[in-house]
Every structure is written in structure tokens, then in C-alpha cells.
Image (spheres, grey):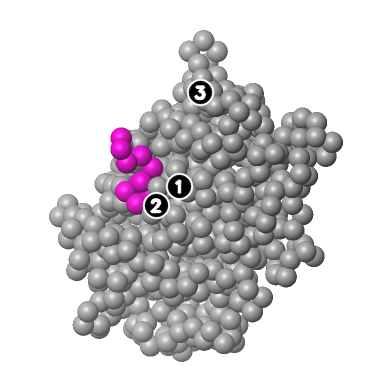
């Protein structure tokens, strides 16, 4: 923690001089304009800064249409023209141009992810799927190879899992829960596949509790009972947080979810297992290995005695889905991934209320809309009273894609540019599709360094190595031949040449009117230095310094 605190202070040296800049300096013109627009901005007629913020939250980075007569979907100008509600409706309707492929001839899954993140149209779907992948975690690192299959088990399994999350990103959360529970990737990762209630001799045994425990703790409820606004409920006598579930209930869920295995022509004998993995189809129920007894789950609900594995799975998932903890627990984490690490309780409650809507409970499309249209998310800047603690450190993947997308690169697919982007992300601490644990790359409740109670999940992977890697990525992308050799080329003629115009451009677009006066002064000073070199090097210098400033690294 001491190292991360020191690094955070070092990062802030350039532009963390206060929420509104030093008092002796006037804010830049674009900031004044942005604050003036705040009062007249609306979701239907968003200004430029509001539209950029929206795209930062709903995509992998804003893009400009520039001189296009009809601005393409997903560009800043298009959002300004049609409004945020319509932009969301358009994104909800977009289907993936291609599925993730586990084929041996296909690029690495991380490479496929970054290609879609940088160049794909279905930005919001992939962004929500990426968020869900960090809540309901499965990982290539936890899926071993098998000599019994003709394909790469980790790659095929996780390709299917990422497609599953993508297809359910705007669907119903209850359907997502069932798809995840039956996923062979998740089954292998958290030991639900071949989770039996009987041993080889046919005698009863205690089923594996791994999936049941993580499903409750990480995927749906959390550890403690929550109010609708996401705050923890406390016992009035002991003063301790109320547990969301008990150990006995974990065991009950493990038994209720027993009897599932890889898809095969037939179920094994009692106590037997399917040893040939099938990562291409959902797991199948084998009642012969299922505990058919009635179990007491949450809120005193008891499952049906002598029922099948499918009936018990349905009862178990319905029981969890209807728990009052699910709306605030899931809503808050989605807000954290898309908008801010520290949403107010009122923000969480507004979104959770949409999640819990009677007759339409768990509608993720409406939950995402509520998150992105909320007053705390919208406007040229966050609400004035919330600015000091608003936003979140861009995770490595988002830092890379936002930097790259602003520069509108051309990608040569013959040179596997996605692999280079994925390798950079790995060096920054986020190897996409290879989360190091079921707690993802960083836990949602990780504290921000040197703050009084603020959360900063992404800071959990910011240390001396990864903060240096962030600088190295930008340097290699801008200055070395590494990007071009990997098929990523940038036309720097799209960036203004005049120093003042360049700094204004960065303040207007990259920082959407939030550039601190101190950063502006230092950029102009650096560009005026005789050692800054010719025009192209000065452009790259300005891009380099801006991308490494907290004003850019923290999405607000």
C-alpha cells in the first residue's frame, strides 16, 4: 500500500492540484464552456463534452467522425446529433460482427478481444460483457488442457464463455445466471462439472462447495445483507454486518446443484464421471449423481423432495435471483465498471430499483440504460459536489483502448495487431481472459490509496511495475516501431501541429474540458522547449504527457 500511495502521489504531480485548479489561475476556456453547458445539456441534446463522457462510459473509447457527412454510430458527433437515449437504443440493437473463436487457427482470445474493442461497432455490448466477465469470473488459467479433446481446452472453453456473456449482456440476469451455471468453462473452473452426491462405491458424499460458494459470494449476493442503496445492514445488537447467507446454506446449494457434467451421449453410472470434456455445449444433468433430498435455501425456502437435478437447479437459481441483495449488489458493480468507483447510495438505489422492477426484474438492458442516463453519469462533468471522488482509474485494457481509439489507427490484420495490444495489457496487469483468480484482476471493494474510505478497485494492480508499464506502453506505441510492426499505424496529420491548437485539442477531446491549468501550462512549456524536436515529435510529446496525466488515466 505504501508503494501504491507514493505512486498515486507521483501520478498526481502533473494535474492533481485540486478539483478546479489552483485559485490563482483562471480555468481554460474549454472548462468554462463545459461548465456553462452543464446547465443546458440534456440526454436528448447532449453537448460535446457530455457525449465524450458518455462514450468513455459506454465504449472502449470515443472516436470523432471528423468530416463525415453522416457521422457513424458510436462517434462523438453522432451522439450529439441523435442524443444519448437513441444512441443506447442503437447500441442495444447491434450484434457482434464475429464470435470469439477457440479454433487453433484463430488469434489468441485476448487478441480477438482487443481487435473488437478497438475496431468493433458493438462497443456497448462488449463493454458490458467485459464488466460481467469481471463479476462472474472464469479464466483460461484455471482450465487445463486435456489429451482427450482435439482442440485447445482453455481457448475453446473461454471463447464459449465470452460469447455467452456477450449474448446475455442485454438480456435478463436470471437467464444469465442459468447460462453461467451450466457453462462447461465455469463448471471446470469452479468444480461444478462432475460434482457428485455419491462416490464410486455409490455411497453418499458431500458435494463440492466451490461453485455454490462463489455464486453466492461473488456472482449474486455478496457477503453481507445490503439495503437497496448498496449500504451494508448491521445487527442492532452486535453491531456486526448481517451475513447474506450461512455456511449451512452454502452446503445446501452445493447439494442442490449436484449431478451436472459435460455433455455426452449418456450419463455415467452412479458415482462415475465423464472424463472427456466438451466445452462446446452446456453441461447436462445426470440425476443418478444428484442429491434429490429437500434442502433449505435462502429465506426459509425448501427445495422439492425427490426432484430432478434440473428442477433443483431452477429452484436454487430462482431463490437467489429473487433475493433482495441481488439488485444493489450487481447494480453497484456495473456502475463501478462503467462510470465511477464510488457511486452515491442514491445512484445505486435508482439503478437497483430498475433491476428489481416488478414484472421485469433483472432486465440488464434497462439496468445499463439507467446507469448511463443517470444524473451522476451525465453532463459535461460530474456534478460539482461529487467531483473530488468521482470516476475510476482506467483499468489497463481501458487505458490502452482509449489511448489507441482517440488516434484512429489503421489495423493490418495480417500482422496480428490485437496480440500486441493484449501483450501491452498483460504487462500493465490485466491479461484479458486470464484473470489470476475468481476475484478477478482486482476486487470491487479495494480501497483507493491515501483516501478516507474511497474505493479504488483498479489501484489494487497499480504498483511500481505496472505504473512503469503504463509509461512504457505509451512510449512504445508512440515512439518505437513496435506498433507499426504489429500492424497498428497512426496518421499523425489528424493531430494539430500548432502547439496551442494541439493543447486545446487535447483539452477539448481527450479530457473533454477538464484539463487542469497546471497541466496546460506544463504542456505548453514542454512543447516550447527547443529540445522538443520537430513537429511530429512535439505532437507525440503532447500525447505522451497527456495520456500519463491523472486527468486522462482517471475516467471522470
Q: Looking at the picture, does residue 11 appear above or below residue 352?
A: below
Position in image of residue 332 (x %, y %): 43, 41
Residue of label 1? 175
Residue 437: assigned label: none
User: Looking at the rendering, in which quadrant would you find the N terminus?
Assistant: top right
At mark 2, the secondary structure is loop
Q: Nearer the viewer, residue 422 or 36?
A: 422
At mark 1, the secondary structure is helix
Give the farthest residue toward the right. Answer: 201
Q: CA distance from mark 1 to mark 3?
A: 21 Å
Q: Mark 1 near mark 2, Cβ–Cβ under 8 Å? A: yes
**Apparent side of residue 126 relative to residue 7 in the rendered image (left or right):** left
Choose top left, top right, bottom left or bottom right for residue 104: bottom right
Position in image of residue 239 (x %, y %): 52, 16
Position in image of residue 36 (x %, y %): 18, 56
Position in image of residue 457 (x %, y %): 53, 47
Residue at image point 80% right, 31% down: 203
Magenta span contains residue 363: yes
Which callout, 1 or 3, points at the residue further toward the start of the chain? 1
Choose top left, top right, bottom left or bottom right for residue 485: bottom right
User: Where does the magenta region start and end?
Assistant: 358-368
Q: Looking at the picture, does residue 512 appear above or below residue 321?
A: below
Residue of label 2? 171
Question: Callout 1 environment at 10 Å: few (<14), some (14 to 19), or many (20+)?
Answer: some
Magenta span contains residue 180: no
Residue of label 3? 301
Question: Callout 2 environment at 10 Å: few (<14), some (14 to 19), or many (20+)?
Answer: some
Which callout, 2 or 3, points at the residue further toward the start of the chain? 2
Q: CA distance from mark 1 to mark 2?
A: 7 Å
- Residue 456 visible (yes or no): no
At mark 3, the secondary structure is loop
Amino acid at each position: 500500500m505504501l508503494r501504491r500511495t507514493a505512486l498515486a502521489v507521483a501520478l498526481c504531480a502533473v494535474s492533481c492540484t485540486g478539483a478546479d485548479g489552483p485559485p490563482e489561475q483562471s480555468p481554460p476556456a474549454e472548462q468554462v464552456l463545459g461548465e456553462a453547458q452543464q446547465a443546458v445539456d440534456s440526454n436528448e441534446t447532449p453537448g460535446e463534452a457530455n457525449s465524450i463522457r458518455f462514450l468513455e462510459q459506454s465504449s472502449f473509447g470515443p472516436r470523432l467522425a471528423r468530416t463525415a457527412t453522416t457521422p457513424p454510430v458510436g462517434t462523438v458527433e453522432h451522439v450529439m446529433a441523435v442524443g444519448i437515449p437513441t444512441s443506447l437504443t442503437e447500441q442495444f440493437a447491434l450484434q457482434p460482427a464475429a464470435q470469439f473463436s477457440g479454433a487453433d487457427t484463430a488469434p489468441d482470445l485476448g487478441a480477438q478481444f482487443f481487435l473488437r474493442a478497438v475496431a468493433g461497432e458493438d462497443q456497448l455490448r462488449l463493454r458490458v460483457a467485459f464488466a460481467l466477465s469481471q463479476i462472474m469470473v472464469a479464466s483460461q488459467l484455471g482450465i487445463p488442457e486435456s489429451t482427450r479433446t482435439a482442440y485447445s481446452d482453455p481457448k475453446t472453453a473461454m471463447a464459449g464463455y465470452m460469447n455467452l456473456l456477450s449474448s446475455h449482456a442485454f438480456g435478463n440476469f436470471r437467464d444469465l445466471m442459468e447460462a453461467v451455471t451450466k457453462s462447461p468453462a465455469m463448471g471446470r473452473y469452479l468444480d461444478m462439472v462432475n460434482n457428485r452426491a455419491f462416490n464410486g462405491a455409490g455411497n453418499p458424499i458431500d458435494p463440492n462447495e466451490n461453485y455454490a460458494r462463489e455464486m453466492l459470494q461473488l456472482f449474486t449476493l455478496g457477503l453481507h445483507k445490503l439495503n437497496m442503496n448498496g449500504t451494508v445492514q448491521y445487527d442492532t445488537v452486535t453491531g456486526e454486518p448481517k451475513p447474506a447467507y450461512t455456511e449451512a446454506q452454502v452446503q445446501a446449494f452445493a447439494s442442490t446443484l449436484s449431478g451436472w457434467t459435460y455433455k455426452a451421449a449418456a450419463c455415467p453410472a452412479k458415482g462415475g464421471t465423464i472424463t472427456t470434456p466438451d466445452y462446446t455445449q452446456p453441461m447436462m444433468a445426470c440425476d443418478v449423481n444428484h442429491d434429490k433430498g429437500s434442502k433449505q435455501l435462502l429465506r426459509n425456502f425448501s427445495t422439492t423432495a425427490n426432484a430432478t437435478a434440473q428442477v433443483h437447479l431452477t429452484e436454487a437459481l430462482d431463490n437467489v435471483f429473487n433475493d433482495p441483495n441481488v439488485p444493489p449488489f450487481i447494480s453497484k458493480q456495473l456502475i463501478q465498471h462503467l462510470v465511477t468507483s464510488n457511486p452515491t447510495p442514491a445512484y445505486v438505489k435508482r439503478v437497483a430499483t430498475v433491476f428489481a422492477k416488478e414484472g421485469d426484474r433483472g432486465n440488464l438492458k434497462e439496468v445499463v440504460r439507467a446507469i448511463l442516463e443517470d444524473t451522476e453519469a451525465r453532463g459535461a462533468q460530474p456534478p460539482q459536489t461529487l467531483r473530488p471522488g468521482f470516476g475510476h482509474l482506467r483499468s489497463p485494457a481501458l487505458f490502452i483502448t482509449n489511448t489507441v481509439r482517440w488516434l484512429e489507427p489503421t489495423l493490418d490484420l495480417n500482422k496480428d495487431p490485437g496480440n500486441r495490444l493484449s501483450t501491452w495489457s498483460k504487462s500493465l496487469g490485466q491479461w484479458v481472459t486470464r484473470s489470476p483468480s475468481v476475484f478477478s484482476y482486482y476486487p470491487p471493494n479495494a480501497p483507493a490509496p491515501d483516501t478516507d474510505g474511497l474505493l479504488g478497485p483498479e489501484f489494487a494492480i497499480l504498483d511500481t511495475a505496472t505504473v512503469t508499464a503504463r509509461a512504457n506502453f505509451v512510449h512504445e506505441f508512440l515512439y518505437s516501431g513496435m506498433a507499426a510492426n504489429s500492424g497498428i499505424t497512426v496518421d499523425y496529420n489528424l493531430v494539430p501541429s500548432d502547439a496551442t491548437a494541439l493543447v486545446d485539442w487535447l483539452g477539448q477531446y481527450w479530457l473533454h474540458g477538464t484539463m487542469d491549468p497546471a497541466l496546460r501550462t506544463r504542456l505548453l512549456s514542454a512543447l516550447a522547449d527547443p529540445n522538443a524536436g520537430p513537429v511530429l515529435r512535439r505532437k507525440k510529446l503532447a500525447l505522451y504527457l497527456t495520456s500519463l496525466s491523472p486527468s486522462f488515466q482517471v475516467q471522470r
